[in-house]
Structures are given as structure tokens and as C-alpha cells.
Image (cartoon, rainbow, N blue to C red):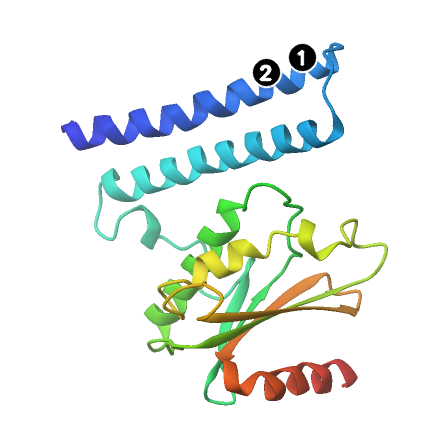
Amino acid sequence: MNEDYKNDILTMREYLFNAVKASDQLLAVSEGAPMSTVSMQQTLERASAQFEDAVLELRKICERYCAGIGGYPKQRLTETAHPTGNVEILEGRWVRITLNTLLPHCRFYSPAWLSDTIRRMLDEYEHDHEPLPFFPKAVLVIEEACSIGGRHIFDQDNKGWKAVSNAIKGRLIPDDDQFSLSIALRSVFSNENRCRIYVGLEEETPEIIKFCQRRQQV
């Protein structure tokens, strides 16, 4: 095929090669090589991130080069099921993204798969419904609903919330810098094990928080 295809495959192979190198380091630890707890976590997250990059690159290759009308990404398994979650407009002005999972454990590397999943959910909403709003100065409220038994990560700084801001940058907000985006992280007791993400104008932060609290009381 063309040179672009070759370059795309080489990029994917580079990601995969780096991931295999990281997994070799982890294997060496299992065989007795010394590694601190922090270094092990970094290596685990690096391996995960690089495998994710390789998979996402391969997915993009499928979308670019698979033959057929509509292409690889246009073929849906079902029109009604939403195994990852859904996107909706609340109060006529806020965006809520519901994930049927909790935020992943992520201390050193932002999970690329989560950013990619959210972007695709936004694409699907706009394809099926209408353009999503854009907030020049926004607030991002991330609310996890879970039980103690359903969650093994409790420190907010060890959760992969940065993947969310990365996903909405350029789509719902201009940037995720401190002057463009304010962030609030909430947790509520529930057996749902879901994550609800709210995006709205920063000036409406109190209304969004009150909305979350009212929904919690229902």
C-alpha cells in the first residue's frame, strides 16, 4: 500500500515494542530483580499506556484503511445498547457524560483509552442528535458513585481524571489550563459503580453541584 500506511504501521509497532520492553522489566522483577514500589507502579502504568497507544493506533489504522462503504468505525454492533455509557444535555445547557465504570487507577500516566472512549461518545451523540455546546470558561464536575467494596482507589490524585479533561479539550472547552477550566471531584456512596461527568459554564458551578446533590437524595 502507500507510504502513509507503512508509516502508520511503523508507529504502531514502535508503541508495541516499547510496551514489550516495559513488560520485560516487570518480568525481571518477578524473577528477583530489585525495583522500588514507586518504580514498579511507574513501569506498570508505562506498559499499560504504551499498550493502549498501540491498540488505539491500530484502531485508527483500521478506520483509515478498511475497505467498504462507511468504513470500520461506522459499523455498530447494536443501535440501542450503550456498554460504555451515554451523553446527554441537562437543563438545556450542561453536558453530562455517564460512564458505566469508575475512573481507572492512574498516578503517572493518563489513560489514553478513556480519553478515546469519551471522544467517541461525544462523536456518536453529535452524529445522532445535535452539536454539543462549547464553554469558553467551564467547570468540570466528576462524580463517582460507588461503595467501599466496589472501589480500591480512594486518593483523588491517583485516579485517571486527567483523561476526562484531555478528552473534552477542543470539543467542549478551548483548553484545560487553570484559567479556562475549574475542576471538582465528588464521590457518593452507591452500589452503581458509575462515573458521571458534568461540564458547564464556570459561573453555574453552584447550580451543577446542587443538581448532583438533589439527584443523590432521590
SS category of the residue bearing label 1: helix
Vertical placement of residue 36 versus 150, above or below: above
Residue nearer the viewer, 117 or 174: 174
What is the quadrant of the C terminus in the image? bottom right
Q: Is residue 25 visible?
A: yes
Q: Furthest residue to the right?
A: 149
SS category of the residue bearing label 2: helix
Q: Is residue 78 visible?
A: no
Is label 1 in contact with label 2 (beta carbons under 8 Å)? yes
Q: Viewed as shown, does residue 117 lie left or right of 160?
A: left
Residue 191 pos. (x, y %): 80, 65
- Specify the label residue 24 is tagged with: 2
Could you tell me the amino acid type at mark 2? Asp
Residue 211 pos. (x, y %): 65, 86
Could you tell me the amino acid type at mark 1? Ala
Q: Residue at x 44, y 25 (%)?
A: 16
What is the quadrant of the N terminus in the image? top left
Q: Furthest residue to the left?
A: 2
- Specify the label residue 107 is tagged with: none
Q: Residue at x 48, y 53 (%)?
A: 115
The CA span between labels 1 and 2 is 6 Å
Q: Residues within 10 Å of mark 1 (few under 14, many from 20)?
A: few
Residue 128 pos. (x, y %): 36, 72
How many numbered markers are drawn? 2
Q: Viewed as shown, does residue 159 lie left or right of 85?
A: right
Vertical placement of residue 132 versus 79, above or below: below
Q: Residue at x 40, y 62 (%)?
A: 169
- Specify the label residue 28 is tagged with: 1
Q: Residue at x 40, y 70 (%)?
A: 173
Q: Viewed as shown, does residue 136 lie left or right of 215?
A: left
Q: Residues within 10 Å of mark 2 (few under 14, many from 20)?
A: few
